[in-house]
Amino acid sequence: MAITCWLAAAYLPAPLGGAHVVVDGHELLQGRWGRIELPLPAGHHQVLIYLRRGRRRSRVAQCAIHVPAHHLVELEYRLAAGWFGGAGLAQPPDT
């Protein structure tokens, strides 16, 4: 699985700490921006990504994916402009 984290220009510089990635209830990665690649076995998975603000999770987005054997599933995590907007996690339109 590969997740590309997109930031609107309103977020520059990027929020401290970066994105946190949880797959099937297990936190696999903490604090990264840009393209994130994580190996996943074939099958169905629940992916959640969020930003940490103090002890709270914010800008939470999640989706279910199916990973075919020997394939890479692309996802995009996009933040709406401004700190009070939402976030989305989905496959890019061209995949």
Image (tube, rainbow, N blue to C red):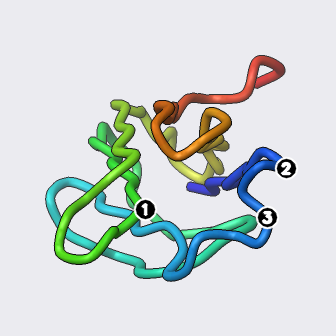
Which residue occupies the foreground of this view, 78 or 39?
78
- Specify the amino acid type for callout 1: Leu
Which residue occupies the foreground of this view, 73 or 71?
73
- Specify the amino acid type for callout 2: Ala
Could you tell me which residue is drawn at 62 percent across and 33 percent down? 80
Q: Position of residue 47 (x, y in %)?
A: 34, 46
Taking 35 as reference, is 32 left or right? left
**Vertically, is 94 above or below 76?**
above
Count of numbered marks: 3
Q: Which residue is mark 1?
A: 40
Could you tell me which residue is drawn at 29 percent across and 57 percent down? 23
Q: Which residue is mark 2?
A: 9
* Cα distance between the residues tagged 1 and 3: 31 Å
Secondary structure under tag 1 reads loop
- Specify the amino acid type for callout 3: Leu
Taking 62 as reference, is 93 left or right? right
